[in-house]
Image: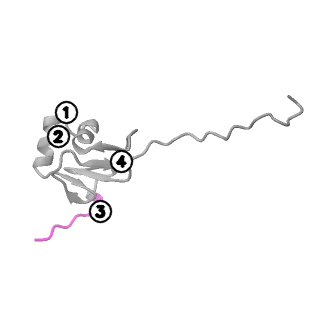
Amino acid sequence: MKIKVKRGDRKPVQSTTIDDAFIRLDALIKFSGNASTGGEAKQLILDRSVTVNGEICTQRGKKIRNGDTVGIRDSFLRVAAPVKPHVPEDQSSEGDPSI
């Protein structure tokens, strides 16, 4: 049986920023507000209601990294690294006669 999905039915992908190199799948589900407890996150994963990059994932401790997309029921999260502010190189005053 094929299921057709109309483009209008798709939920937008939300971006979630993490400060570390990775976050565990169950922690991401809880952090994003899709589960209020770790036990609820675990149950979502065991019920096969979670996908990682389009594939069903049943590993609670799966490491989710920058660029991964996680589907939880009918919502989607894209994990992004934090944007680091641009810091110009230190411009020393050596050789500047005005100082």
Q: What amino acid is found at the position of numbered circle 2 in the picture?
A: Ala
- Along the line of sight, the residue nearer the viewer: 66 or 21: 21
Using a 10 Å C-alpha cutoff, classify the residue at mark 3 as few (fewer than 14 neighbours), some (14 to 19) or many (20 or more): few
List x then y, in percent, for residue 26: 21, 41
Left or right? Give the position of 96 relative to 7.
Answer: right
Q: Sequence-wise, which precedes: disc 3 or disc 4?
A: 3
Q: Relative to residue 55, is residue 96 depicted above or below?
A: above
Quarter-of-image position of residue 99: top right
Disc 3 designates what residue?
7
Quarter-of-image position of residue 18: top left
Q: Main secondary structure of the magenta part?
A: loop
Q: Viewer-nearest of labels 1 and 2?
A: 2
Q: Is residue 10 magenta?
A: no
Mark 3–mark 1 CB contact (< 8 Å): no
Q: Secondary structure at mark 3?
A: helix
Marks 3 and 1, how far apart in space?
30 Å
Disc 4 designates what residue?
79
Marks 2 and 4, how far apart in space?
17 Å
Q: What amino acid is found at the position of numbered circle 3 in the picture?
A: Arg
Q: Which mark is residue 36?
A: 1
Disc 2 designates what residue?
41
Marks 3 and 4, how far apart in space?
22 Å
Type of colouring: one colour
Q: Secondary structure at mark 1?
A: loop
Marks 1 and 2, how far apart in space?
8 Å
Left or right? Give the position of 15 relative to 26.
Answer: right
